[in-house]
Amino acid sequence: MTMTTRQYRLTPGTTGLALQQDTRQLPLLAEDQILIRIGAVSLNYRDRLVQQDAATTRSGLVPLSDAAGTVVAVGRHVSQWREGDRVSPGFFAAWQDGPFKPHHLASALGGGSNDGVLSDYVIAQADAVVAVPDHLSLAEAAALPCAGVTAWHALFERGQLQAGETVLVQGTGGVAMMALQLASAHGARVIVTSSSTAKLRRAEALGAWATINYREEADWDKAVLDLTEGVGADHILELGGPATYTRSLNAVAHGGRIAQIGVLSGFDAAPHITPMQFKNASINGICVGSLAHHVRLNQFMTQHGIHPIIEHQFAFDEAPQAYSALAEANHMGKLVVTLD
Ligand SMILES: NC(=O)c1ccc[n+]([C@@H]2O[C@H](COP(=O)([O-])OP(=O)(O)OC[C@H]3O[C@@H](n4cnc5c(N)ncnc54)[C@H](OP(=O)(O)O)[C@@H]3O)[C@@H](O)[C@H]2O)c1
């Protein structure tokens, strides 16, 4: 049977790449593949970078990495999934488990030349998806592949977070709010920074131990030291980039860990890292995570009954508005597009 799918593609526009909706025929399913009817997708800051990067993004690329949906057909050699199962593609189709290898990077969905998930139907390798936890809607599960797995990898896989430790997250976007929820559930004390006092009040309601408005208190590193009686934060999710590196080095505790994750203020200006040696502190580079990380994140979410924070859900035809909302950055947590 011939099937078609609605999808968005990134094509050259007047400034960078523009979203264009079209309808295409789906290829035939290979014997080790599954066909997923997508229920929801979510946006990440990375999707802005992909859209702006006409040099490395293939013209015609289907964007976005994060989705959840329902299996509607399986290839004849697929035994682990059945029609009706709810699944979510992993961010890196090739990174199943174990250490990160160079070829894993090239398997990221929705970037470079790999089509993503902003589509009614997606074909995936059967071993490149994870089951959606029962307590989550498809919209909630679509919030996890990039932001959730990154926060989990940074805090629990590399960070070995312990109850009672202090965690600092920067801003109130997708990665930061997932980290707040995960770390709080584990018994850590989470400090949240934000440009918005209203968002900080919401973060407190979500369990933040302390909050700092980084616009009003530019020396937020000193505020972290004050809050922790001079000790500093045991874990810092470094999301800001050049605007925040140096203060993160100042605010991290002796023996603490900085998870180098974000580029919100750009890619330049490497910090002066010598202070790390006098603190016996570490910098962990974090690049999302593996399917095994995703599975363990889902187990933790289930155990603690955690639901990701979704600021707004857009309809499929409103995907361009979802991109605009991401750029405006008034959201807390995630922005989601739901499909019929
Ligand atoms: N390495 C990886 O594998 C990986 C994975 C996921 C994300 N990332 C990166 O992590 C960053 C966050 O991604 P996301 O998807 O969570 O973003 P997002 O949802 O778009 O969040 C954006 C928020 O970041 C905050 N922000 C902006 N500039 C800031 C600054 N200078 N200092 C502190 N906070 C600032 C703002 O929060 P307020 O409005 O509250 O101030 C803004 O609303 C991005 O740079 C992204 O590329 C990397």
Image (spheres, rainbow, N blue to C red):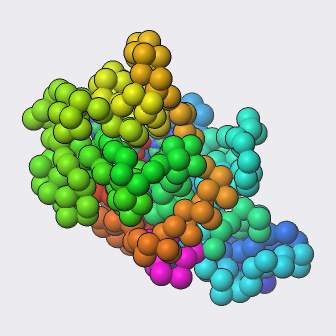
Quarter-wise, where is residue 235 in the image?
Answer: top left
Residue 282, position as x, y percentages in the image = 50, 28
Q: Nearer the viewer, residue 228 or 223?
A: 228
Q: Position of residue 125 (x, y in %)?
A: 77, 64
Figure check: 318 above or below 226: below
Q: Residue at x 38, y 38 (%)?
A: 234
Quadrant housing residue 295 = bottom right
Image: 220 above or below 197: above
Residue at far bottom of view? 84
**Residues drawn in magenta:** 132-142
Q: Is residue 140 magenta?
A: yes
What residue is drawn where x is 47% and y is 23%? 280
Quadrant in the picture for the N terminus = bottom right
Q: Is residue 66 left or right of residue 324?
A: right
Tell which quarter ligand 1 is in: top left
Please give the name of the residue rendered at 35% of the width and 30% of the height, measured from the top-left corner: 252
Task: Inspect this view and state whether residue 166 appears.
Answer: yes
Q: Position of residue 98 (x, y in %)?
A: 74, 48
Indicate yes or no whether the magenta region holds residue 234.
Answer: no
- Whether residue 10 is visible here, answered yes or no, is no
Q: Is 201 on the left or on the right of 118, as rendered?
A: left
| 299 to 79, vertically: above or below | above
Q: Main secondary structure of the magenta part?
A: loop
